[in-house]
Image (cartoon, rainbow, N blue to C red):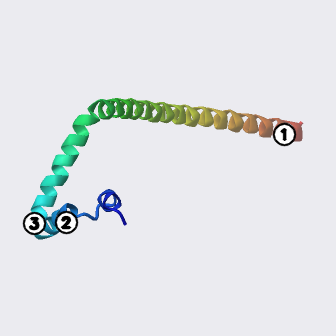
């Protein structure tokens, strides 16, 4: 394996030294992770902001659709009750007509 291959595959002395240091000092690993995260967030701030705005818009739309769904369900229940009342009234009128025919 060439020196370039070792470097590119992270098997050089510096990488191995860093690995050993991080093994003995896990708090240093946390600091490195925080630094890398902060750097990544800075480099991608515009993308993160756009994603947050898009997420907020989707959440707003979702909330409004939930409200709309609840309203439509309530309207459905109201219409269903009115329909049942009409069906009951028709059935009562039909029974009354049958009773009238029987007595006449």
Badge 1 density bin: few <14, some 14–19, many ≥20, Cα 10 Å: few
For the residues marked 2 and 1, what is the alpha-carbon distance in whole angstroms? 94 Å
Judging by the rendered image, the residue that carries numbered circle 1 is 98
Give the structural element (helix, strand or loop) at label 1. Answer: helix
Q: Quadrant of residue 58?
A: top left
Query: Comparing marks 2 and 3, which lies closer to the viewer?
Result: 2
Judging by the rendered image, the residue that carries numbered circle 3 is 25
Residue 15 x/y as whole percent: 21, 62
Badge 3 density bin: few <14, some 14–19, many ≥20, Cα 10 Å: few
Badge 2 density bin: few <14, some 14–19, many ≥20, Cα 10 Å: few
The reply, left or right, for residue 12 in relation to residue 80 is: left
Give the structural element (helix, strand or loop) at label 3. Answer: loop
For the residues marked 2 and 3, what is the alpha-carbon distance in whole angstroms? 10 Å
Q: Nearer the viewer, residue 54 or 72?
A: 54
Query: Comparing marks 2 and 1, which lies closer to the viewer?
Result: 2
Residue drawn 31% across and 62% down?
Answer: 6
Quadrant, the N terminus: bottom left
Residue drawn 60% across and 36% down?
Answer: 81
Residue 19: image tag? 2
């Amino acid at each position: 394996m060439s020196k370039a291959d070792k470097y590119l595959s992270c098997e050089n002395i510096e990488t191995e030294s860093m690995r050993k240091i991080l093994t003995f000092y896990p708090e240093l690993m946390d600091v490195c992770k925080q630094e890398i995260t902060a750097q990544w967030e800075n480099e991608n701030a515009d993308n993160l902001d756009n994603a947050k705005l898009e997420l907020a818009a989707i959440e707003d739309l979702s909330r409004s659709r939930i409200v709309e769904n609840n309203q439509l369900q309530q309207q459905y229940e109201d219409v269903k009750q009115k329909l049942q009342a009409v069906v009951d009234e028709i059935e009562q009128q039909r029974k009354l007509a049958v009773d009238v025919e029987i007595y006449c």
